[in-house]
Every structure is written in C-alpha cells, then in structure tokens.
Image: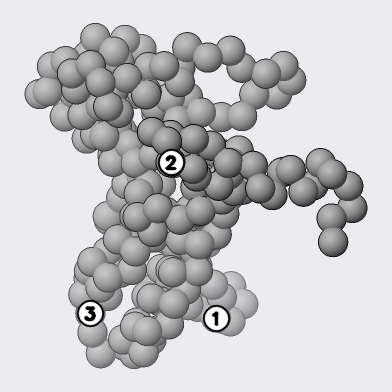
C-alpha cells in the first residue's frame, strides 16, 4: 500500500497529448536507448557496457589465441564490439566519470588483444599500461570516436531547417539552469571538443560542410591525456 496520498498521485500521474493519456515514468526504453526523467546518462552507459561485455565474451576465444594477427583482432573489435557500445553515442552528454568507464572497458579488450609484456628489469610478465596501449593501437580510441560522431551529428542538427530536432535543440539551450553545480549538457561537450583544437565559433563554422568535416577529423585525431 502507499504510505501517503502523494505517493498514490505520483504513480497514476498522466499527461494528456492529443486527447491521449500517457503515464509518467522515471525511465523507459526508446529505440534501444534508456531515457530517464532527469535526462541522466548513467543508466544508458551501464547498459551499453553490459552489451560490450556480452559481445566481448562471444568473441573472447578469437582474441585470446595468438593465431589471428593483431590487426585482424583490432578489426574484429571495431566491427563487432565497438558498434554495439557506441549505439546512440552522438547524443551522450558525457562526464569524466562516464568517459573513464568507457576507456577502462576498451583497455580491457585491448589488453586481451596485445597480451602481456615481459618486464626488462624483473623478467616478469605484466599488463600493458594505457599509454602503451595507445601507442600499439593505431586506430582512434573509443572516446575520440565518440567525439567525432558527436561533432558530425551536431553539424547535421545545426544545418536543419526550423522544426523537429533543430527547434528542440535551440529551445533546450534557452532554458534557465538551476543553481549549484550545473549538469553537463550535450552542447557543453561540443564546445569542449572544439576548444581542444583551438576553435570557438562552431555555430558559424558548421554551415561550411568541408571545413566542418576537416574539424571533425581534427577532433578525432587530436590526442588528449
């Protein structure tokens, strides 16, 4: 039973749209993406990482054996595992915490691909450090791929005509934000990624497709610690 009347009202609270009633819920899945009432990304990242683990275990035997060359193993990772993880990543407003979780998961797969390394001093086998993994892996890491896709999608949205996603994007940026430490927004990620390569006027730059595509490649190839 409900503890008070307020709890009962919250459960059965509905919204009327075009004379149809829709129950208000804390979260729901739409096109395999978890959407929450507070627009947080934590549960979606957690779901994506579970998918990564399931996909990783399905091809673990291929990554474990030394017979396939390492470039083939990298191709398996980028064509089978990575797309499962990055589904819908263009709209993720990532924080440092979520970025760290994604990098840790990718490094776990890369360590299986590149195996352990014998220490020249002690002679013992040890795990590869993340800097060594970055040097061995010639392909952009997972975070650089996310940034590139996010930049590309931002260009599509900004060039759209008025209405639809374009209107929702600009209306969301005009709303007042609550006091205190503000939650990172999707546009904040865009600005941070562009500032890394020394650009600021992204709203004007986005209208030039060629220059925007060049910027997208710069963001993907730009390495940050």
Q: Earlier in the sequence, mark 1 or mark 3?
A: 3
Q: What residue appears at the point 44 percent right and 69 percent down from the top-left corner?
A: 51
- Helix, strand or loop for disc 2: strand
* Residue matched to label 1: 125
Q: CA distance from mark 2 to mark 3?
A: 57 Å
Classed neighbour count for the residue bearing mark 2: other residues with Cα under 10 Å, few (<14), some (14–19), many (≥20): few
Q: Is residue 75 visible?
A: yes
Q: Nearer the viewer, residue 196 or 97?
A: 97
Q: Nearer the viewer, residue 98 or 107?
A: 98
Q: Earlier in the sequence, mark 1 or mark 2?
A: 2
Q: Quadrant of the N terminus?
A: bottom right
Above or below: residue 12 compared with residue 192: below
Quarter-of-image position of residue 205? top left
Q: What residue appears at the point 51 percent right and 53 percent down from the top-left corner?
A: 28
Task: Give the residue at the far front of this rendering.
Answer: 19
* Residue matched to label 3: 69
- Helix, strand or loop for disc 1: strand
* Residue matched to label 2: 20
Please state if 2 lies on the left or on the right of 92 as rendered.
right
Q: What residue appears at the point 72 percent right and 16 percent down from the top-left corner?
A: 179
Q: Nearer the viewer, mark 2 or mark 3?
A: 2
Please state if 135 lies on the left or on the right of 121 as rendered.
left
Classed neighbour count for the residue bearing mark 3: other residues with Cα under 10 Å, few (<14), some (14–19), many (≥20): few
């Amino acid at each position: 039973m409900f503890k008070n009347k307020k709890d009962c009202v919250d459960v059965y609270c509905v919204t009327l749209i075009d004379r149809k009633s829709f129950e208000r819920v804390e979260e729901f899945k739409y096109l395999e993406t978890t959407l929450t009432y507070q627009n947080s990304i934590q549960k979606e990242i957690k779901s994506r990482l579970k998918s990564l683990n399931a996909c990783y275990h399905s091809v673990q035997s291929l990554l474990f054996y030394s017979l396939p060359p390492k470039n083939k193993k990298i191709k398996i990772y980028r064509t089978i595992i990575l797309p499962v993880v990055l589904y819908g990543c263009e709209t993720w407003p990532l924080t440092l915490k979520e970025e760290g979780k994604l990098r840790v998961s990718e490094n776990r797969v890369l360590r299986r691909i590149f195996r352990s390394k014998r220490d020249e001093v002690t002679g013992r086998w040890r795990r590869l450090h993340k800097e060594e993994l970055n040097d061995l892996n010639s392909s952009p890491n997972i975070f650089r791929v996310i940034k590139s896709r996010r930049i590309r999608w931002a260009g599509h949205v900004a060039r759209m005509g008025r209405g639809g996603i374009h209107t929702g994007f600009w209306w969301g940026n005009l709303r007042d934000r609550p006091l205190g430490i503000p939650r990172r927004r999707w546009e904040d990620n865009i600005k941070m990624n562009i500032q890394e390569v020394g650009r600021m006027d992204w709203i004007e730059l986005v209208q030039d497709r060629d220059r925007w595509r060049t910027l997208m490649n710069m963001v993907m190839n730009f390495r940050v610690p």
